[in-house]
Amino acid sequence: MASGEYSLDDHNSMASGEDSLDDHNSMASEEDISTYFTGTHEVQECLEGQGEVDLHTHLANCEKNPGHKKFVPVNQLSVEHFPSGYHDNDLYDLTKALADVTVRIAVELTSPDRPEFVRGTKDPYPCYNTRGQDPLRTGTGRVGKVTKYTEGMRDYRTCPCPECDHSDTPSKVWWKVGVLTARHVVFDSSEARQSSCRLWFDDDKSPVVKIYGWKDSGSNSVGDMSILNCATHDLDIGDNLQKIMIRFIDLWQKLEDKYKSRRDVDKLTFIVSHPHGWSKKVSVGHWLHRQELPRPDVNGHVAKGKLTRYTYTTCTCPGSSGAFVYRIGCAWSSHPHTGSKSTGLNYSGLWAECDL
């Protein structure tokens, strides 16, 4: 790992520094997609010109989870919100750490290249009807990699954030923040450049802290994965994210060791997301089904492990798309929340697991 770089995704190309989730690299073919894992995507769309005002309406009029009683505001979370046998301070600390790396994504452009249907299905692809327009939509993401850039580094360039991009004296020290989310939230680089991530949006009184999209460094339609690269030269933001990532990685490893033997017995799952674009909430549930797919042969080489996706009861709403689905006791994995079926059962995108 390079100096100044903090990443927990050691089963994907982010850890190798390639920052790629290419459609043809280490993902299953569209013929392997099970229709059991299709339904309604959960990006929160707003009416054109309404912006943040429309989010209030969606929150108040939510039909999937009226009153949002199964969501716990992150600042009110306690160990008692987990089932008996999991009233564990380490699990509480991990959940809070995951909350600290969870961001609300706001996108203000719909790419003209969005497809009409979800790849391999006849399900309509989100936001197809607003291609080329700029209505606000929101989703959720998770910081996956933080890299500090200084002069002399390989691939060095000055800060590409919007402020520096229009400045004659762009900052020479900056951080690249790779945010993992669902591809239907941020489809490509044209959308990435019109995206922002709000950090530490824990309640209505949280200060507004944002980093801005720079490019989409890799995406995968089959797995519904995307890496949104953001840039910031704010010293406090960069340093804080690096410290948070170190703590998150340490806690994740600790909880994997503690609960691995119960992982596929209790099947406990939690999600931190931004329902309807508002402050982050925690929901706890169980995964029910796992689809396992072999990883394809790429240039004569088959990567270790299997591609997996899950269904689960863990509560979500529009705006939760792209949130990280955490299975207690699991090794490194980054399944994004993708959608919900009419029954209320939720499902994830694809990710590679090597410890099944």
Image: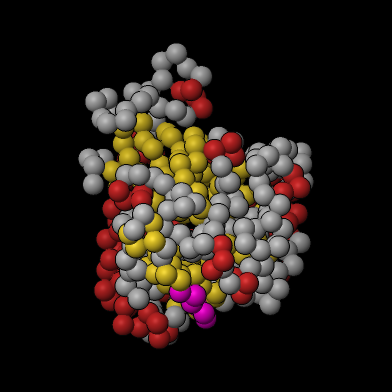
- The part of the image, by quadrant, that contains residue 97 is bottom left
User: Residue 182 appears at what percent x and percent y?
Assistant: 54, 54
Majority secondary structure of magenta residues: strand
Residue 14, compared with residue 156, is above or below; it is below
Left or right: 53 as drawn, with respect to 324: right
Dividing the image into 4 quarters, which one contains the C terminus?
bottom left
Q: Is residue 101 visible?
A: no
How is the structure coloured here? secondary structure
User: Residue 260 appears at what percent x and percent y?
Assistant: 31, 78
Which residue does the image show at 41% across and 15% down from the upper left? 169
- The part of the image, by quadrant, that contains residue 79 is bottom left
Which residue does the image show at 26% across and 40% down from the upper left? 4
Which one is in front, 246 or 215? 215
Which residue does the image show at 34% across and 63% down from the upper left? 302
The answer to if 77 sits in the magenta stretch is no
Residue that protrudes farthest toward the front in the picture: 300
Q: Is residue 170 visible?
A: yes
Q: Which residues are magenta?
A: 287-292
Which one is in front, 124 or 227? 124
Residue that protrudes farthest toward the top in the picture: 168
Residue 356, compared with residue 191, is above or below; it is below
User: Residue 133 appears at what percent x and percent y?
Assistant: 73, 38
User: Residue 347 appears at what percent x and percent y?
Assistant: 57, 69
Total numbered badges shown on the rendered structure: 0
Which residue does the image show at 28% across and 53% down from the upper left? 246
